[in-house]
């Protein structure tokens, strides 16, 4: 595994989840395969009690350790990233993101929450060793229109920013990961 998508919304259908899915599609178009870790699927008690020996927690931490790049998506609540993401990041070793490319995606109610990525999330990611950040993508709710079926539509400007970010992830990966094997 080379790329891990981390969904940090407690909701099954969310704007941040739609951003993550769209980012994953763009990475796939570049020939990069990714796995998704949905933090809401981890056992709540094991997360809250930092049960590092729990098999689900161990597997999630191992997925992070094996990834060359991490793409995480979080809703912004009250000018901070989700508590679910905070609890999970606290379970990672101090150097748990060392040498990894990290791309942050977030959705929030207004542009007033834009700086939560820079002032709340980025310092935590840096403290975990992330040294190759990709410019984050923040989307306000109005940029992610809700369709009648409950899905979210990614607008053109947001799609452009996601494509640029996916390209930056691709460019930062080791060549052995970023260059798909040719089929003969």
Image (spheres, rainbow, N blue to C red):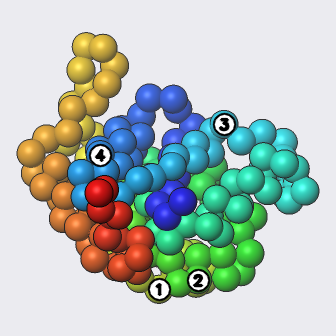
Rendered position, 130 above or below 138: below
Given this view, does label 2 or label 4 mark the residue nearer the observer?
Answer: 4
Which quadrant, please, contains the C terminus? bottom left
Residue 44 at what x, y percent from top left? 77, 40
The answer for how far apart the CA atoms under marks 3 and 1 are is 28 Å
Q: Is disc 3 surrounded by few (<14), some (14 to 19) or many (20+) residues within 10 Å?
A: few
Q: Residue, x 50% and y 77% (percent of image)? A: 100
Q: Compared to 140, does 151 lie above or below?
A: above
Where disc 3 sits, the SS reads: helix
Tell which residue pokes out farthest to the front in this image.
184
**Residue at 47%, 61% in the rendered image:** 3
**Mark 4 or 3, closer to the camera:** 4
- Mark 3 lies on residue: 41
Q: Which residue lies at the image location 23% right of the left edge and 67% below the top edge?
A: 167
Image position, residue 41 (x, y; %): 66, 37
Q: Which residue is mark 1?
A: 131
11 or 39: nearer the viewer: 39
Q: Earlier in the sequence, mark 1 or mark 4?
A: 4
Give the mark nearest the N terminus, 3 or 2: 3
Q: Position of residue 58 (x, y in %)?
A: 79, 56
* Disc nearer the start of the sequence (2/1): 2
| Tag 2 residue | 98
Q: Classify mark 2: residues with Cα within 10 Å, few (<14), some (14-19) or many (20+).
A: some
Tell me: 158 left or right of 74: left
Real-space CA distance between mark 4 and mark 3, rounded to the nearest whole angstrom:
22 Å
Residue with the mark numbered 4? 25
Q: Could you tell me residue 64's position as x and y percent?
A: 62, 64
Q: Are marks 1 and 4 in contact (CB under 8 Å)?
A: no
Task: Spot the residue most to the left.
Answer: 156
Q: Closer to the camera, 150 or 52?
A: 52
């Amino acid at each position: 595994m080379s790329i891990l998508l981390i969904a940090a919304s407690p909701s099954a259908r969310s704007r941040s989840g739609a951003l993550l899915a769209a980012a994953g599609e763009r990475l796939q178009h570049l020939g990069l395969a990714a796995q998704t870790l949905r933090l809401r699927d981890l056992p709540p008690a094991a997360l809250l009690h930092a049960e590092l020996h729990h098999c689900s927690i161990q597997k999630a931490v191992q997925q992070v350790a094996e990834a060359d790049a991490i793409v995480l998506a979080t809703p912004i609540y009250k000018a901070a990233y989700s508590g679910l993401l905070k609890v999970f990041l606290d379970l990672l070793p101090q150097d748990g993101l060392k040498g990894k490319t990290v791309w942050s995606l977030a959705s929030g109610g207004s542009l007033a929450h834009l700086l939560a990525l820079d002032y709340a999330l980025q310092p935590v990611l840096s403290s975990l060793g992330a040294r190759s950040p990709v410019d984050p993508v923040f989307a306000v709710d109005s940029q992610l229109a809700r369709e009648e079926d409950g899905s979210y539509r990614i607008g053109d400007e947001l799609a452009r920013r996601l494509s640029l970010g996916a390209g930056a992830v691709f460019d930062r990966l080791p060549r052995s990961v970023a260059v798909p094997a040719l089929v003969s």
